[in-house]
Image (tube, rainbow, N blue to C red):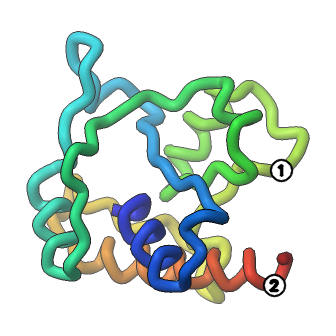
Amino acid sequence: MAEFYMKDLVKKAGLEKSFTIASAATSTEEIWNGRGNPVYPPARRELAKHGISCDGKTAVLMKKEDYDRYDLLIGMDHNNLRNMKRIVGSDPEGKLQLLMDYTDDPHDVADPWWTEDFETTWNDIEKGCKALLSKLYEEA
């Protein structure tokens, strides 16, 4: 959800040519027989409620090379961050961050997998992505 919300936010700001935004799994749970699952239907529905499409997206696994490819690698929660550190090995440039650490209320993004509360997750993602984009504006 965060990938597609951030893409929408950046596009509405007229900045889509300045960003490469992608998401990747930090575990193989959504990847079967070498193929990724599509976006989870309740997440797709939550995005659609906000006029955002995720058509064509399938899960891909994060790779060690992603560390060199991207300026920032943003995790949704501490479990993601732990897995990301395991995948990339080390973080000498401080690229591994948590989304909600950019807000005035740092916490893990609510995980809807267990709660089915996609609205709370949406609210966290919206707040986190807006704060992240604001921070990137400050640094530009």
Identify which residue is drawn at 20% across, 33% down: 37
Whole-percent x, y for residue 61 in the image = 44, 28
- Front residue of 76/68: it is 68
- Front residue of 121/78: it is 121
Whole-percent x, y for residue 9 in the image = 46, 78
Task: State the separation of the CA atoms marked 1 and 2.
Answer: 18 Å
Whole-percent x, y for residue 59 in the image = 32, 35
Residue with the most extreme bottom position = 104
Q: Is residue 39 left or right of residue 21?
A: left
Q: Using the image, determine if residue 32 lies above or below residue 22.
A: above
Q: Residues within 10 Å of mark 1 (few under 14, many from 20)?
A: few
How many labels were placed on the picture? 2
Task: Give residue 94's mark.
Answer: 1
Q: Residues within 10 Å of mark 2 (few under 14, many from 20)?
A: few
Q: Is residue 83 left or right of residue 116?
A: right
Task: Give residue 70's mark.
Answer: none
Q: Using the image, determine if residue 77 lies above or below residue 11.
A: above
Q: Nearer the viewer, mark 1 or mark 2?
A: 2
Task: Give residue 138's mark.
Answer: 2
Identify which residue is drawn at 58% across, 53% down: 20
Q: Is residue 19 left or right of residue 126?
A: right
Task: State which quarter of the image contains the C terminus.
Answer: bottom right
Q: Is residue 78 left or right of residue 43?
A: right
